[in-house]
Amino acid sequence: MSEHRRKPPQPQGGGRAAARRAGQQPSGRRAAPTHNAAAGSGATPHGEERPYGGRAAARRAAQRGGSRRRASDPGAGGAGRGGRGGGRRAAGGGRGRGSGGDGRPAKKRFIDYPRAGKSGFRRWVPSWKLVTGTFLFFFAVLLGAVGIGLWLVQVPTAQAASQTQKNVYYWADGKQMVVSGGGDLNRQIVPLSKIPKSMQNAVISAENASFYDDSGVDPMGIARAVVNMAKGGATQSGSTITQQYVKNTYLDQSQTITRKVKELFISVKVGLDMDKDDILAGYLNTAYYGRGAYGCQAAARAYYDRDCEDLTASQSAFLASTLNGPNLYDPNGGYGAVATKEANTKRAKARWEWILRREVAVNRMSKSEAQKWIDKKFPMPRDPKVATNKQGQIGYLTDLADNYIVANTGISKSQLDKGGYQIRTTFDRKKISELTRAVEKVTKENIKPKERDVDKYVQFGGASVEPRTGKIVAIYGGKDALEHYRNNADYTGVQVGSTFKPFVLAAAMTNGVRDPEGPRDQPDSERTLVSPKSVYNGDNKVTLRDYDGTVWHDKDGREWHQRNDGDEDKGPISLRTAMQFSVNTPYIQLGMDVGTDKVRDAALAAGLSKEQLASITPTFSLGTSAPSAIRLAGAYATFAASGEQAEPYSVERVEDKDGTVYDHKKDVELKRAFDSNVANNVTDVLENVVQHGTGSSAQIGRPVAGKTGTTDENKSAWFSGYTPQLSTAIGMWRVNDQAKSQKFLSMRGVGGQKTIHGASFPAEIWADYMRGALKDEPVKDFPAATPIGQKIFGEDASPSPPPPSTSAPTSPSASPSKSPSSSPSASPSESPSATDSCDPLDFKCHDNGGNDNGGEENGGGNGSPGDPSASPSTDQPGGPGGGIFGGPSGPRRKN
């Protein structure tokens, strides 16, 4: 078609409309230019089309067109918009509202923020859709995080510290003695049934009133704690009882966000899996109440010296107060300037009263009951005491109880060391105190190591046992359990000397002496029971003979000539009087006539242990054995009980959190060791020792039977005696317990005395202690002894009395009750009398050679020419065995 026939181009709207139409052209293809576009968008002067420059050129053109307005044509859609500027927008598909840079519609954003199409502040105000969406998003994230956390976080194993407990030892009267063993924390776990409702109600009311209804967590409380920690301020608890139980049992005490988050997750799981009562019991048993007490049982003992189950509602309210911060609520004061006694008492009273009223508010106590306790005033706790202090005698007592438990209850040492046991002992606080006082009095008045070197290393040991029960009611183990580690009351290394002679007499009255004319191969075929009136040769260094009259020889073929103390000759003397003045030669010969094996059996029947007995030799009858003070007291208690033997014991009952695991009452068994008349005759003879013999310093104004004992070279001294209610043995020796190589030392010169005998310091201590221990006990007499056995005459003891002594007799007793008779007893069946100081046949019984100690002997190693005893050496204090309950024989390990 010719140029002149072509229609002239029609005007087209420029500006936004053109740009919109241009933008609507499909991308990637060349748009057919309109005449207007050709004219207004850069057509060549010759009418040729300008090549299309693609998207980039269109975008640049649109940007240029959208940012300009021609000054010459301000009208919309006019020549200016349809001119150069409009042409650019058209050619470039100029940006318009709702259009993309390439001519397509603009994509909507997923989060329209800042808001499109808004200007000014409206651009920054989020829409309701954005707010709702954001909330739902974060809620979903939170739920997801909680779900993942609950899935990932497992309830860990309870911390060892939350499970460790102390062993609690109680006196015989039920008062707490000490806590020991287990871990470092003073805790005793008890079941919820032993925690009174008053304690449960007080804690729930004060700490978490909705405990039984909530889910176990308090999100708002945790939020407050997190905010405070984020600000760097003090943490605020707000935790439920469940959360506190989780913190105490499974987590540490750090105040961090991580620990709080773990606490939350674990608390949720624990709240779902555990019974509420178990959670409450766990919390009450792990919470810290102050004074080193973890758990309400330890707290009840620390503040009120009673078991948790015995707390009153008022006391429970106070203990619940301490959970709010014991350092600020203990009326005894705490650490820091604000924790004075006055301030703490004021705070404690206010908190105590608040808890009582709070219990009313949450319906856990009636108003009248709360007012009753408020009217009774604040339950002031006792002054604090160190619960784990093992000073003085306490360490010896707990060791003795531990040894008994391991030996008799089935509880192993490792189990005991883990703690958690409540141990009810037999120890009497009053008697322990009296025994300690008596020893310390003698020590203070007489033993002065700074003045006399010989007074160094003096040791005392003692024990009291109750006849017919075997209860060990008191011991003296040494100066201090934290300084002297060996328990002297349970020590088995010290020979007991003549305190062993009563077992020889008991064997003679039980088994009798062998017939010297009987067949050698049947020595037991004919035996004659012995009366205490029987007569033996009491001279010094009498030749020792076998039961058939032949001279006894040791393994080297040597004869044995036993010495008496002071080398005194006593002549023919009754067994009763020989016991009275502790003459050796009659009893070593009596042991040969009866048989040392029978003597051993009598000692074992009385209660001594086989491990504590020396080897069987003639001097066995004179006390070469080394039983402990406990065993010796227990054996003498058999005589006090008319021949009924009760095994000494120190633990009545053992309990753990599940109940009683050992009860001694079920195991009590009395054994008939001797015929009652045999035991009563021994008692009668020993009464005479105290009334008129070597034990006169043990008189205490009531019937007492006892015996002194001293060993070779004065290396130990004993007094063991009893009343019908109590048997006690006191020993004294000298040894450096800190030396690497220990050996017994002579006590000559100790306390300024030439020699130490059982009648001196041991008997003095015994008497002083027994007066105090029996102060409130009624005076009782021993059962009467009836005649027993026959009066026999030992080898070299003539049945005809020697002429009376021309010298005036000297008696250790100030006023003997009867003068010696000039003629022998007419009847061997005459009943022995406790009022006779001498046997009628013994004319020399008052002559003790001028020795103030009544002729006390030097044990079993005093023969001539040598000691045949194979007993443990007195130079080696280790002893033949362990303690009474199987404890170590060596020094106690320092804890």
Image (cartoon, grey):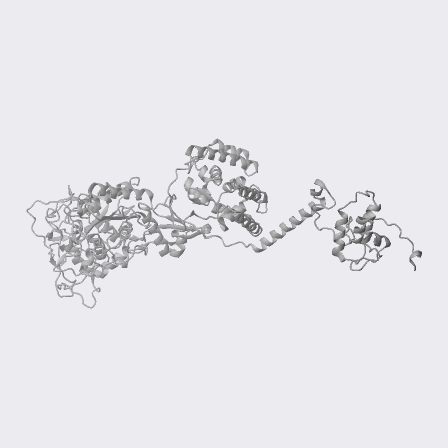
Q: Nearer the viewer, residue 415 or 207?
A: 207
Query: Which of the two residues, 753 or 532, is positioned nearer the viewer here?
Result: 753
**Residue 694 shows in this picture:** no
Q: List x then y, in percent, for residue 452.
A: 17, 45
In which quadrant of the rendered image does the N terminus lie? bottom right
**Outermost residue toward the left in this view:** 806
Q: Nearer the viewer, residue 27 or 536?
A: 27
Left or right of residue 764: residue 292? right
Q: Residue furthest right?
A: 5
Of 327 and 702, which appears nearest the observer? 327
Residue at the outermost top position:
375
Residue 334 is left or right of residue 530, and the answer is right
Considering every residue shown, the one lying at the far front of the view is 45
Report whether residue 495 is seen.
yes
Total marks placed: 0
Residue drawn at 52 percent across, 34 percent down:
354
Residue 472, how many percent across, how many down?
32, 49
Q: Position of residue 865 (x, y in %)?
A: 11, 60
Indicate whether 181 appears above or below 228.
Answer: below
Residue drawn at x 82%, y 55% is 43
Question: How far from the left and from the top, in percent, is residue 310?
Answer: 45, 42
